[in-house]
Image (cartoon, rainbow, N blue to C red):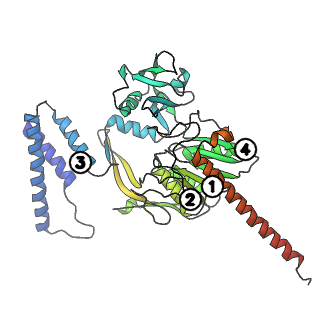
Amino acid sequence: MTTHKVNAAAAMLALILLWPAAPAGAASTPEDQATEATLTLDELRTFSDTLRIVRQHYVDERSTPELLDAAVRGIISTLDPHSTYLGPDAFQREDTGTRGRQGGIGVRLEADEDRHLVVADVYPDGPAWLSGVQVGDRVLAVDGTRVRGRRLKRSMDAVQGEAGSTVTLRLRTGSMQPRDVTLERALVPIPSVRGKLIDDTVAVLTVNRFHLATAEEFTRRLEALRRQTDGAFDGVVIDLRDNLGGAIKPAAEIADGFLDEGLVVYTRGRYPASHIEYFALPGQWAPDTPVAVLVNGSSASASEILAGALQDHGRATIIGARTYGKGSVQSVLRMRDGSGLRLTTARYYTPAGRSFDQQGITPDITVNARARAGNGAGTGTGTGTGTGTGNDDSATRAEWQKDPVLAEAVQALRQDEQAAQEVMDEAEGEAQNGQAHKPRP
């Protein structure tokens, strides 16, 4: 293709994308249209000139497809931090990730306090689990490329890939000699909810991310814990710390599970099609049971929706630190070449009409601590918490009291439970007293 034809094609594409639209309800005159067309063509000439000059004079040769791809990425990158261009491979990973499956080896990687890349979770029945990879293993190299001196995110991304392909990790367990493990990637179901009991009476459900099956996982974990307590809890803790979000619907469904009615969350954007509202349905999972939600500066998006909804309805006490403040809606739009755009199209609002975008959710009780039992200093770059494999467990007092945020939550729940019991006892006493002094007909 000649330079002239490439420039003409690029200009036509940009003209279609950038041609300004008249405001809704306003009629544009021929004069307005002519002015807008002239301005757009002037801008397109600058784009065309830039493309031509870079192709001809840049020190390293760049192909036209590379430059056009860079132009698209440049447009999106100027919008906001959350709008991104997804190449075909990235779009495919995004699509499978929201379904709770990931092309990889079935581990969650984090950076420890010394900035070493370590295995934080090993998912049951995944390639890593079947090959004996252990929680705490340090990753030294990926496919022969050392982790040290390389950006951690690049090493993490290198572990992922198409199902059926292979990756070789150099691992070290404790002080043992390093070993190489070659694993075949697969689509691994990723557990998103863990459950445990504290003192046999308080249910703690840790949600490390939100995918489309998270609400279903949450109810299964909650029911499993309920069976261990003969059907009753002193309180329920929902741990959303370090949960960066994910799919929004399951977060709204979990909020609904603790509400009988009312708005859960709504969105507003430039177009009516972006206006969405979620309402709670009658019925609760744990009626009359006090609830606490744990958050920190890495609780974002769907986590903030869940926390904000329960806070506005007075259904839960929010404990921890101010959340991240990611209250905008990203729609993932597929392009005809298999790539996609993750584009901000609206903002979320809590039931009380609060926008938490760039502001976050302020806790009812502030505890500025990231440490938690079983998870070091909590400085990981991945999502989720804990070092288990997703099985329900029971935490001893010594374990959970190492986590100051969780300890504060347990104390607050028991105070709420005690206060609720006192109200019930008082109401029952008044009813009995009224019956005793009721005059005979």
Instruction: Give the x, y percent position of residue 312.
Output: 54, 63
Marks 3/2: CA–CA distance: 37 Å
Q: Amino acid at mark 2?
A: Leu
Q: Secondary structure at mark 1?
A: strand
Marks 2/1: CA–CA distance: 9 Å
Marks 3/1: CA–CA distance: 44 Å
In which image quadrant can residue 290 be found? bottom right
Q: Secondary structure at mark 4?
A: loop
Say if 384 sits above or below 139 in the image: below
Q: Nearer the viewer, mark 2 or mark 4?
A: 4
Q: Badge 2 is on which residue?
A: 310
Q: Nearer the viewer, mark 3 or mark 1?
A: 1
Q: Badge 4 is on which residue?
A: 200
- Tell me if I can see residue 277 in this picture: no
Q: Badge 3 is on which residue?
A: 75
Q: Residues within 10 Å of mark 1 (few under 14, many from 20)?
A: many
Q: Earlier in the sequence, mark 2 or mark 1?
A: 1
Q: Badge 1 is on which residue?
A: 291
Q: Secondary structure at mark 3?
A: helix
Q: Amino acid at mark 4?
A: Asp
In which image quadrant can residue 90 be found? top left
Residue 63 image label: none
- CB under 8 Å between discs 2 and 1: yes
Q: Nearer the viewer, mark 4 or mark 3?
A: 4
Residue at 45% from the left image edge and 64% from the top image edge: 354
Q: Secondary structure at mark 2?
A: helix
Instruction: Give the x, y percent position of residue 414.
Output: 69, 55
Marks 4/3: CA–CA distance: 54 Å
Marks 2/4: CA–CA distance: 24 Å
Q: Earlier in the sequence, mark 3 or mark 1?
A: 3
Query: Quick one: quadrant of the N terminus?
Result: top left
Q: Amino acid at mark 3?
A: Ile
